[in-house]
Image (tube, rainbow, N blue to C red):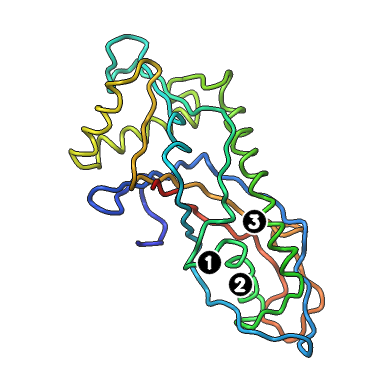
């Protein structure tokens, strides 16, 4: 898969599998622990090689189904009608972002490797408090999920309320998702979209199938903020920590 930033927020991975980057899903959390250097006489080991900032997390369809809702103020449903309204459900989210993998590594290990390389330009780990940093990253999962819910709450008046695409970032994103499926997907996937609607009543929801993906962006902010200075560096290339962000592809299995 091409891990470069895509020009469009809806694109195909394969002729049958699409990716939708839902841009309002963008959250960051501040780490509680600052990396602390080890004594090289105590420990020295090879770290990991540098990777991109794209990670993958396999999820079940039920974690996304009933998330993106839409309806028409007039029936029967007309996807292209100006009266269409859209929204994203404000509910409890439980994505295990820290378990996403980049180049075969979970995010805690990739994060540690990446900041280690940025500072020292070496694969040898120079931090001693790896366990604490790992725990920080894992604990941010619940904060990210809560922030997603809170961010939706600031964009809707009521739970799962629907709006014109011009009234809410999330309403517009829902419209983008539907437009992407109907514009770029295969005829088979388009037919599946309408088949899924046939068994529903208003408000309708986008049903996800294996091969579909939603992308969210998360960021890990250093304890003392972006660009925080680390003391105790000797002959290192850099003495600052910067926010590290990941695009997490939530791949439906």
Q: CA distance from mark 3 to mark 1?
A: 16 Å
Dot 1 lies on which element?
strand
Percent across and percent down for residue 100 are 52, 56
Identify the residue position indicated by label 3 in the image.
220
User: Callout 2: 10 Å neighbours few (<14), some, many (20+)?
Assistant: many
Dot 2 lies on which element?
helix
Q: Is residue 81 left or right of residue 90?
A: left
Percent across and percent down for residue 39 are 80, 84
Q: Quadrant of the N terminus?
A: bottom left
The answer to whether the residues at label 3 and label 1 have Cβ atoms under 8 Å apart is: no
Work out whether 119 lies above or below 95. below
Name the outermost residue toward the top: 74
Sequence-wise first label, 3 or 2: 2
User: Callout 1: 10 Å neighbours few (<14), some, many (20+)?
Assistant: some
Work out whether 164 lies above or below 74. below
Work out whether 129 lies above or below 203. below
Q: Is residue 94 left or right of residue 16?
A: right
Q: Nearer the viewer, residue 232 or 181?
A: 181
The answer to whether the residues at label 1 and label 2 have Cβ atoms under 8 Å apart is: yes
Q: Nearer the viewer, residue 104 or 224?
A: 104
Numbered tag placed on residue 113 in the rendering: 2
Question: Which of label 3 and label 1 is nearer to you?
Answer: 1
Numbered tag placed on residue 105 in the rendering: 1
Sequence-wise first label, 1 or 2: 1
Sequence-wise first label, 3 or 1: 1
User: Callout 3: 10 Å neighbours few (<14), some, many (20+)?
Assistant: many
Q: Residue at x 57, y 37 (%)?
A: 93
Percent across and percent down for residue 44 are 69, 86
């Amino acid at each position: 898969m091409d891990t470069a930033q895509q020009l469009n927020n809806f694109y195909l991975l394969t002729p049958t599998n699409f990716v939708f980057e839902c841009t309002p899903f963008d959250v960051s959390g501040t780490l509680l622990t600052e990396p602390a250097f080890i004594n090289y006489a105590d420990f020295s080991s090879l770290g990991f090689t540098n990777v991109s900032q794209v990670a993958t997390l396999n999820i079940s369809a039920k974690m996304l189904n009933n998330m993106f809702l839409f309806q028409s103020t007039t029936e029967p449903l007309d996807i292209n009608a100006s009266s269409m309204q859209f929204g994203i459900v404000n509910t409890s989210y439980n994505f295990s972002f820290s378990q996403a993998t980049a180049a075969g590594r979970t995010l805690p290990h990739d994060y540690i490797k990446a900041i280690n390389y940025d500072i020292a330009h070496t694969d040898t780990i120079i931090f001693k408090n790896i366990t604490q940093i790992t725990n920080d990253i894992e604990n941010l999962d619940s904060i990210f999920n809560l922030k997603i819910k809170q961010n939706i709450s600031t964009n809707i008046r009521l739970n799962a309320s629907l709006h014109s695409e011009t009234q809410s970032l999330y309403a517009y994103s829902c419209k983008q998702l539907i437009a992407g499926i109907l514009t770029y997907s295969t005829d088979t996937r388009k037919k599946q979209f309408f088949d899924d609607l046939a068994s529903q009543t208003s408000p309708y929801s986008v049903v996800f199938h294996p091969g579909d993906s939603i992308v969210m962006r998360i960021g890990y902010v250093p304890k003392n903020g972006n660009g925080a200075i680390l003391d105790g560096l000797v002959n290192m290339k850099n003495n600052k920590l910067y926010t590290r962000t990941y695009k997490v592809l939530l791949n439906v299995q």
